[in-house]
Image (cartoon, rainbow, N blue to C red):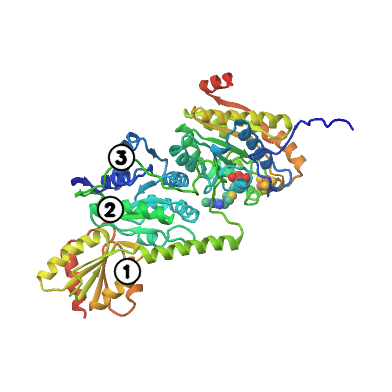
Amino acid sequence: MAKVLMKGNEAIAEAAIRAGCEAYFGYPITPQTEVLEYMSARMPALGRAFVQAESELGAVNMLYGAACTGARAMTTTSSPGFSLMQEGLSYIACSEVPAVVVNIMRGGPGLGNIQPAQGDYFQMTKGGGHGDYSPIVLAPSTVQETVDLVILAFDLADKYRQPVYVIADGMIGQMMEPVELPELKPPQRPERPWALTGAKGRPRNIITSLQLDPPTLEKVNLRLQETYKRIRENEQRHEEYMTDDADLLVVAYGTAARIVKTAIAKARRDGLKAGLFRPITVNPYPYDTLRKAAEKAKRLLVVELSAGQMLEDVRLAVMDKRPIHFFGKMGGVVPMPEDVVDAMKKALAEA
Amino acid sequence: MSEAKEEKIVFQRPKALCDVVTHYCPGCLHGVVHRVIAEVIDDLGIQEITVGIAPVGCSVLAYNYIATDFAEAAHGRALAMATGMKRVHPELVVFTYQGDGDLAAIGTNELIHAATRGENITTIFINNAIYGMTGGQMAPTTLPGQVTTSTPTGRDTKLAGFPIRVCELVSTLEGSAYIVRRSAYNPSEIRKLKAAIKTAFQVQMAGLGYSLVEVVSNCPTNWGMTPLESLKWLQENMLAYYPLGDYKVKDSVKELMAKK
Ligand SMILES: Cc1ncc(C[n+]2csc(CCOP(=O)(O)OP(=O)(O)O)c2C)c(N)n1
Ligand code: SF4
């Protein structure tokens, strides 16, 4: 298919539609509202479900309901709304139903602002709600990659019957880039023997996250952990950029990684050998591949639009084998590539 | 030997009611309401197309008793979940079963908006004026002066405000089609309750909008009464604040009822 120029948020919506999303629920919040607006026109026109929910609590539980019937379903939100969804997402994970959630992060904490930020990393990658669950989190850094990862999110959600998150920010949500989308097809529903569709010709199904008996709940937890193990073994994704000869390995994801790429080109013109390690799955985190990549470099620099959250995962991967520096901006402040180049130089100078 | 006479079955367990012992306290009306719902499901022949949603509250295990597909919602979110299901499967009959804390405190937002959107969903609402499951705290429906574990000297309306009348509130919303209050304290009321639940399901199946049947119920355990005392207390105290009756019956519903 030919490429079309699309805004990130609209591309997310259209990608979900092409992935066979049958139900969308959302609540307005900048900078993701265009997804909701786009869906409000497209979904009913295609005979699919769209509800503007009364709140993010409503949206996530509508998602849960639709997911229980076996439909591919999605909600999108931004940071404060994502906070509100945590209880529901914990239920979804425990109930083992597939669901896709996109968080177009904004500056926080509190009401914060609507500028690009990555301050929700802990909340998204470490569970966020109560209990031992571990959602898959995909972090695109271009609009095309956002399209691809939204589609992948639906496939992974189906495959593992778990919530899958796509993590981006206002920069990616609002920018326009050329994208290629798969063809529009009617939604296909694979066999889902567990779904609530009316107990016709089969024993009835019950979907619950309640297990009053501790050994039974332990069994559910062990099954979840088994799923997360399979996910860790099969679904880690990352990109390496100019890492072969790099003295300085910069680790960044999403919008921060875009800026780092530009910064690396500038730094290399100044004779500074830097490369980028970009996790695409920020959960499961590519610990082993990062460890190997780090061994080739002298030192590391983590760049984030936060106080240093992914930094902890980088430390877990590299331990104290290499010095790890950090450069971060908070509150919706987006660094210029030059700022990153300065941070790179500083990191190497400290050697 | 005289010829064996064919016997007529006058009473049996509804097909849609599981043959198990419930966890409810002796004398609790939750069990009675479950049975009535199961009878209606049998009467309408909808067991294979019905999905129930259990709340968080004493009836959290309703899915162990009513024999249809079932989900268990987060506290207060049953109607959001029901909305998600019904929008992708309009052919299903979707009902929520909720207590007063679940529906009228933590879930009020979901209630009001599901009703105002006119979702084709049915809610069976158990008003027992108390939080049963957590051990007898004040509910949004606790009566003024009523003693609970969190209103130890009786509900003081200056501190804790006034009880919510759900039917009166929801009936003001355009999307609500059939909103009625019943009880289950004697066989005659149980019969009326059954008729109302049947109508509520039929309203949903005809796509006429949101339907809710409130059941003025009891909680002998946390009221600190015997089952019989609790039924007496219900009649003497609750019915004055929560009068039984029809609060909203849309014309379209009246037409439907006239046809049936
Ligand atoms: C988010 C959340 N808050 C609180 C609770 C604890 N909780 C469980 S049941 C309940 C009250 C239920 O009361 P009601 O809805 O009146 O039902 P009943 O038990 O009386 O049938 C509460 C507060 C919970 N499970 N989840
Ligand atoms: S605690 Fe009250 S509402 Fe709960 S089962 Fe016992 S009597 Fe019924």
Residue type, label 3? Glu
**Which chain is indicated by disc 3?**
A
Q: Nearer the viewer, residue B20 or B187?
A: B20
Distance between the Cα atoms at labels 3 and 1?
Answer: 35 Å
Q: Chain of mark 2?
A: A
**Mark 3 vs mark 1: same chain?**
yes
Do the numbered discs 1 and 2 sit on residues whose CB atoms are within 8 Å? no
- Discs 1 and 2 carry the same chain letter: yes
Identify the residue shown where x is 65% and y is 51%.
Answer: B135
Describe residue A102's horizontal placement relative to residue B5 as left or right.
left
* Mark 2 residue type: Asp
Chain on which label 1 sits:
A
Q: Nearer the viewer, residue B127 or A229?
A: A229
**Nearer mark to the viewer, of 1 and 2:** 2
Residue A248, compared with residue A71, is above or below; it is below
Residue under pointer 1: A311
Q: Relative to residue B91, is residue A124 depicted above or below?
A: below
Residue A37 disc label:
3
The answer, for residue B168, to whether it is visible in the render is yes
Which is nearer the N-term, disc 3 or disc 2? Answer: 3
Q: Could you tell which of marks 1 and 2 lies nearer the N-terminus?
A: 2
